[in-house]
Image: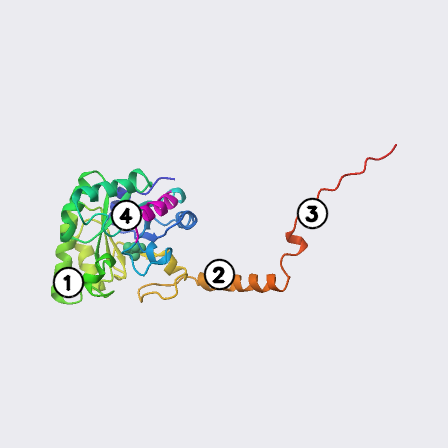
Amino acid sequence: MERVTTATFRELKARGEPIVMVSAYDYLTAKFSDEAGVDSILVGDSLAGNVLGYANTLPVTMEEMLHHTRAVARGARRALVVGDMPFMSYQASVEEAVRNAGRFVKEAGAQAVKVEGGSGVHDKIEAIVKAGIPVMGHLGLTPQWIYQLGGYKVQGRSASAARQLVREARLLEELGVFSLVLECVPWRVAKRITRSLQIPVIGCGAGPYCDGQVLVLHDLIGLTEKTPKFVKRYAEVGQIIKESLRRYRDEVKKREFPTLAHSYGTKRKKRTQQV
Ligand code: KIV
């Protein structure tokens, strides 16, 4: 089984075959995703809310991201593992950006990193790429910029905002990113960007005309309670977990569980036959 690489991403775009990506955070869900044939696993900083209980993605640290990236890397044998660079791991200086990107690859087993933003962080992206680390760009709704964006809103809706997005996407391609996530962008704008770039564009709430799609695994299997309009929930695993726990609780309270069928017996000594 060959590992998906950044070259595979380019080949898939050239063939017109959609790239399938999920955001996942641990060994077991990475293994399930890999076995299901998902092409790439992003260890997204959405880990902050979905696993660690933070109010948004800003507090999650490098150490927390590396810890979860290691677990995902152990579970993913085929899928390309992308580590999401957390807030303030790359914004302050080029040197810090390169060093932290390097930690994802060297210490956690990622094969690429994702960085939010365009012209505002162009020097950092360029330096990481020059250090030999593949970078996935991320434009549109970039949750690390939430206070500047003024909320979780669709981006690029007006003609001028759409033109700006197209410019930023082209800049990222010039800087050498191997692919680009577009989050919460009108489908027409995403289609235009997808057609105008050589690199694959991965949509996340950006309509059906992108080269690939990424969803958060917790959203698509129904672990999270509220999901945005663009998410399709393929299962309601959260309900199954809650119902199982309720039944377990009730059965223990009523002494219906465990029965002897779930219990161990002692070893019986065999009687030696007297001759
Ligand atoms: O953090 C994340 O999971 C992401 C995806 C939604 C693209 O950035």
Point out which mark residue 10 bears.
none
Q: Are marks 3 and 2 in contact (CB under 8 Å)?
A: no
Q: Which residues are magenta?
A: 60-73
Give the mark, 3 or 2, whose residue is nearer the N terminus.
Answer: 2
Give the mark, 4 or 1, whose residue is nearer the N terminus.
Answer: 4
Instruction: From the image, tell me which residue sits under label 1.
Output: 162
- Calculate the distance from the C-alpha at mark 1 to the C-alpha at mark 2: 42 Å
Q: In terms of depth relative to the viewer, which is nearer, 91 or 132?
A: 91
Q: Position of residue 12 (x, y in %)?
A: 28, 48
Query: Is label 3 or label 1 in front?
Result: 3
Instruction: Name which residue type carries label 4.
Output: Leu
Point out which mark residue 265 bears.
3
Instruction: From the image, tell me which residue sits under label 4.
Output: 12
Q: Secondary structure at mark 3?
A: loop
Which quarter of the rendering shows the N terminus?
top left
Q: How is the image coloured?
A: rainbow
Instruction: Name which residue type carries label 3.
Output: Gly
Q: Are marks 1 and 2 in contact (CB under 8 Å)?
A: no
Point out which mark residue 241 bears.
2
Q: Position of residue 126 (x, y in %)?
A: 16, 44
Q: Secondary structure at mark 4?
A: helix
Left or right: residue 269 compared with residue 107: right
Which quarter of the rendering shows the C terminus?
top right
Q: Position of residue 249 (x, y in %)?
A: 56, 62
